[in-house]
Amino acid sequence: MSEAQRKPWEAVRPEHVALAAPTRSRLQQATDAWLMDPEVSEQDDEKKYTSVCVGREDDIRRSERMTAVVHDREVVIFYHKGEYHAMDIRCYHSGGPLHLGEIEDFNGQSCIVCPWHKYKITLATGEGLYQSINPKDPSAKPKWCSKGVKQRIHTVTVDNGNIYVTLSKEPFKCDSDFYATGVFKVIQSSS
């Protein structure tokens, strides 16, 4: 349908627009990859959920954090208050580097604060936290609320002084999945 044939109130649908591959931005390509559910063989799928040794317990206890690539997915591992936590390395909001953020407690929950836009993400669940206030009540105090799970959390285990990370098998799409694709990688894998 040509521009002249289309009525002003008719929307331009994707089938009306042909984009050449070189004109597509990295962000558009990443969006396409994230939205598509590529078929993966069962063997590849099983391998993706095996534990990977990412370092030694002594090392992470000293530094309190480390980054790693686990089956082509970048993660950050935190050691905080005697517990290990792993999550996608890039913030769900805008891809900020969570490994550079500070850990703070909000409403009794330990959170990583994204250094770019100060988004707060719980270490234990990956929930995004925000403060809310009732605008109709001038004396109301802000209270902490959850946006739901926004950041993908992965399992950390310790065996014989080694730290292992197993990627999450949760079937839902997490907002942080978008930035876990190849075009946003910050760590170069050794393979």
Image: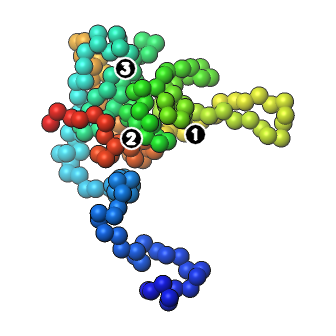
CB contact under 8 Å: marks 2 and 3: no
The residue at which mark 2 appears reads as: 170
Q: Position of residue 56 (x, y in %)?
A: 25, 15
For label 3, the SS is strand
Residue depicted at 28% across the width and 28% down the height: 68
Amino acid bearing label 3:
Arg
Tally of numbered discs: 3
Residue depicted at 40% across the width and 27% down the height: 99
**Residue 147 has which mark?**
1
**Residue 81 has which mark?**
none
Mark 1–mark 3 Cα distance, whole angstroms, equals 25 Å
Instruction: Determine whether 40 is above or below 144 in the image.
Output: below
In the figure, is residue 29 to the left or right of 190? right
The residue at which mark 3 appears reads as: 65
Asked whether residue 86 is in view, the answer is no
Say whether disc 1 or disc 3 marks the residue closer to the N-terminus.
Answer: 3
Say whether disc 2 or disc 3 marks the residue closer to the N-terminus.
Answer: 3
Q: Nearer the viewer, mark 2 or mark 1?
A: 1
- Residue 144, quarter of picture: top right
Colour setting:
rainbow
Instruction: Determine whether 25 is above or below 80 in the image.
Output: below
For label 2, the SS is loop
Amino acid bearing label 1:
Lys
Say whether disc 2 or disc 1 marks the residue closer to the N-terminus.
Answer: 1
CB contact under 8 Å: marks 2 and 1: no
Q: Most extreme residue toward the left, as rendered?
A: 191
Residue depicted at 36% across the width and 24% down the height: 77
